[in-house]
Amino acid sequence: MQPETEADLAAMIRAAKAPLRITGGGTRALPDEVGEPLHMAGLSGIALYEPEALTLVARAGTPLAEIEAALASEGQMLAFEPDPRPGSTIGGVAATNASGPRRLSAGACRDAMLGVRFVTGDGEIVKNGGRVMKNVTGYDLVKLMAGSRGQLGAITEVALKTAPIPPVRATLRLRARDDTSAIAVMVTAMSGPFDVTGAGRLPDGNVILRLEGLPGSVEIRAGMLRDAVAKHGDADILEGDADFAMLRDFAAGATGPLWRMVLRPSDAAQMLAGLPGRHAVDWGGALIWAEAPPDWMPDLPPGARATRLRGDAASLPETDPVTARLNAGLKQKFDPRGIFGGAP
Amino acid sequence: MQMPEPDTSVIARRDAIASRLRAALADRDAVLTGPAETRAYECDALSAYRCPPLMVVLPSTTAEVSAVLKICAEEGAPVVPRGAGTSLAGGSMPTSDAVLIGLARMNAVLEISSADRLVRVQTGRTNLSVTQAVDGQGFFYAPDPSSQLACAIGGNIAMNSGGAHCLKYGVTTNNLLGATVVLMDGSVVELGGPMGEGAGLDLLGLICGSEGQLGIVTEATLRILPKPAGARPVLIAFDSPVTAGACVAAIIRSGILPVAIEFMDRPCIAATEDFCGAGYPDCEALLIVEVEGTPAEIDEQLSLIREIAESFAPLEFRESRSEEESRRIWLGRKSAFGAMGVISDYMCLDGTIPVSRLPDVLAGIGELSARAGLRVANVFHAGDGNMHPLILYDANTPGDLERCEALGADILRLCVEVDGCLTGEHGVGVEKRELMGAQYSDADLEAQMAVKDVFDPGWHLNAAKVFPLDASARRRGRHAA
Ligand SMILES: Cc1cc2nc3c(=O)[nH]c(=O)nc-3n(C[C@H](O)[C@H](O)[C@H](O)COP(=O)(O)OP(=O)(O)OC[C@H]3O[C@@H](n4cnc5c(N)ncnc54)[C@H](O)[C@@H]3O)c2cc1C
């Protein structure tokens, strides 16, 4: 099924009798999504781009690559840095809240989303938010739709806040003694006035810290930061941020079952010590990606969450009953007939 | 301001409800019913409208909030949550049948973790005192509404409040990691997580900005940030507001990200000069642009900003060279609302527009203001298009308030027409409730009200706010029945 307009889409959803799996590029799907694919590729194109207002509005099926190219030609970017999977669409990025290393400083995809249009399970066309930078008019359904993974509605259009591409980027790279010291480097970097826009550890064990901005400023901060982490190791200062592209793309390139764990940085060292295979750390220690054999389950600290993105679907800890009731209630309101087969 | 007819059966049961509530609270004095006591809660900062609540309850713990809500649900009593009562939209304005729940006693700091860059507080705590609690460790809490000395974190979350520095740091929702929320049936739920994301849907994002209609937030986990090495403002004066607007667009386009770009026009400058004598230049419009970093970084940014500004032939480019000069540059801006309050009664609007439309909208506001015969002063967060036109009126002149409200509605409709919105940070409350239809279709409003159905099926919580009374009538009626 592939609608060409929002009205088509609404009609198809109203007529649907069996579950539909809303599909952008199909690059970020979860194992347990069900239904006939509802391809969003027909609803494509950038509807508005005002660089001087840092605003871009695009239809959901627009390829992420097309958006990145349009932005780059004006010296801009998506600050939340979604990983560029071939075929990925902006609707899929929004519906999965896909956010890369810069989430640490610039926020997630949901934080850059200014407005959405979507079609509910009843075939109603709904808009929320808008295209302006600040908007508290009514409830924030933009956040509700961000990361909703095709459970509540088919997103047809997204308004996004764009950001200038920083003139200069530099990466500090160092080998820390052990997990504890690696996390300590990230915590130090995030706790001082360095304006770090990425902090993680690659599977090869290198801790990487990113600085961006005007040339003089990056140089000053790189020196300060190198001194601040000196007791953990000697940092090399590299031009550019190629290491961060590797970090951002770790999940897409992983093999076998893959766990995504979000936790407090202060719990990260202990978590890392117990991992069974190749892994990477992002978000200053708050995100761990880990390859693991099918029978492995993480032992999570309080407050942490883990999801298995490849292999059999799994999610820890079990959702508490009140949250589960609210999630189910919203699903029931927005998709009363259960037409959308997105993974909960 | 129209409010629904109070539920007389609830009012008739006031004493019975009060005694049930007293029995549920550790401190019997935490339930106030005397007229002198309830009058202190009769309005928020939208002070043209007042109505003492049926009673005021001041719980001290999440468990007490839970017990109170459960009793109110059983009694069918409407509930109005209140932080510090600084809402400019009437968000915490009570009705005569409402139990007002004040969070002021819940002001503890529960945890500070510098390693995880977060602080957990009870939501009655004031915004500024959150920053004060982490200041010693070199951190601050970024969203800084001008009301930060008084307003509470719970109110900030309910309104998704912004501040002068949100151009760089975002608003409340971008800095909120977790919340403990009590639903109307008394159930307690923890939302969010270490990076703000919880299980499944983004319920935390939904709660933030829901104007106290979905649940009462009793605890919040907030992101804290390391203090910048330093900050310095410049003041740039122009002979026309349109040029000032164009300069804002050029700065943003250049790729520099100042922490703040503030705009003031002549009427506003004149009022603040009389009020506090900040020594602002004689000009039609001025910008205050602030950047952060080490002295060398600040110099680097300011030299670029100077270069951009000079292409707009400013009347003056005043760069601060000391703490004292920085303070004076901010002085007029920070006292703007107070200054206007001295010369006149005023109503503060909060529409947001695309920054590219700033010149048209300023001209449009000028025309509307001339037609209405009421003066409008403009002061706003120019970097993000969040305007604060202040309409000056005289509360003692019969009909002036109504004319002022009509002009306000016209200005907000203008904001919506240029693809903007009714409110950028103050919220809808009762004030803009009836204008929602200008921005949203019936289906759009239906989708929002469906969310309230899930969290508060009986529509007890702050129910006569946000949605046009007609649109919400059927749902609110269900609870009266
Ligand atoms: C002089 C002045 C300057 C201002 N400047 C700014 C500014 O720069 N930026 C800005 O964004 N706003 C500003 N405001 C508006 C106001 O300060 C904010 O909306 C603030 O967040 C309200 O907080 P409060 O604690 O006073 O909330 P209240 O007025 O008590 O309540 C506001 C709303 O929140 C609800 N609520 C309160 N606590 C809770 C809770 N714990 N759980 C659920 N719901 C709750 C209430 O029911 C109500 O709907 C300003 C106001 C004034 C008077």
Image (cartoon, rainbow, N blue to C red):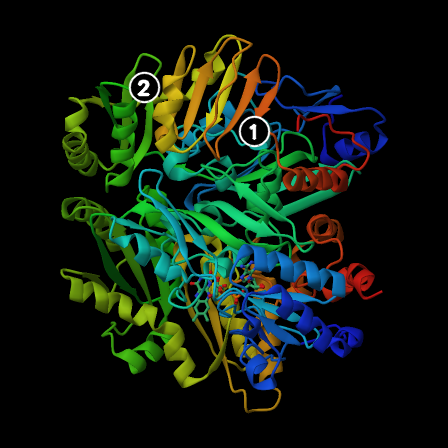
Residue at the spot of label 1: A317
Which amino acid is tagged 1?
A: Pro
Position of the N terminus of chain B by quadrant: bottom right
Position of the C terminus of chain B by quadrant: bottom right
Task: Name the N-terminal-most of marks 1 and 2.
Answer: 2
- Across and down, in percent, residue B146 comes to 39, 65
- Across and down, in percent, residue B123 comes to 48, 57
Q: Is residue A133 left or right of residue A322?
A: left
Q: Is residue A85 left or right of residue B95?
A: left
State whether residue B387 appears in this view: yes
**Local crowd at mark 1 within 10 Å, few (<14), some, or many (≥20)?**
some
**Local crowd at mark 2 within 10 Å, few (<14), some, or many (≥20)?**
few
Name the subunit of mark 1. A
Q: Is residue A96 left or right of residue A232?
A: right
Residue at the spot of label 2: A242
Name the subunit of mark 2. A
Nearest to the observer: residue A73 or residue A191: A191
Question: Which mark is drawn over residue A297?
Answer: none
Q: Nearer the viewer, mark 1 or mark 2?
A: 1
Q: Could you tell me which secondary element the residue under label 2 belongs to?
A: helix
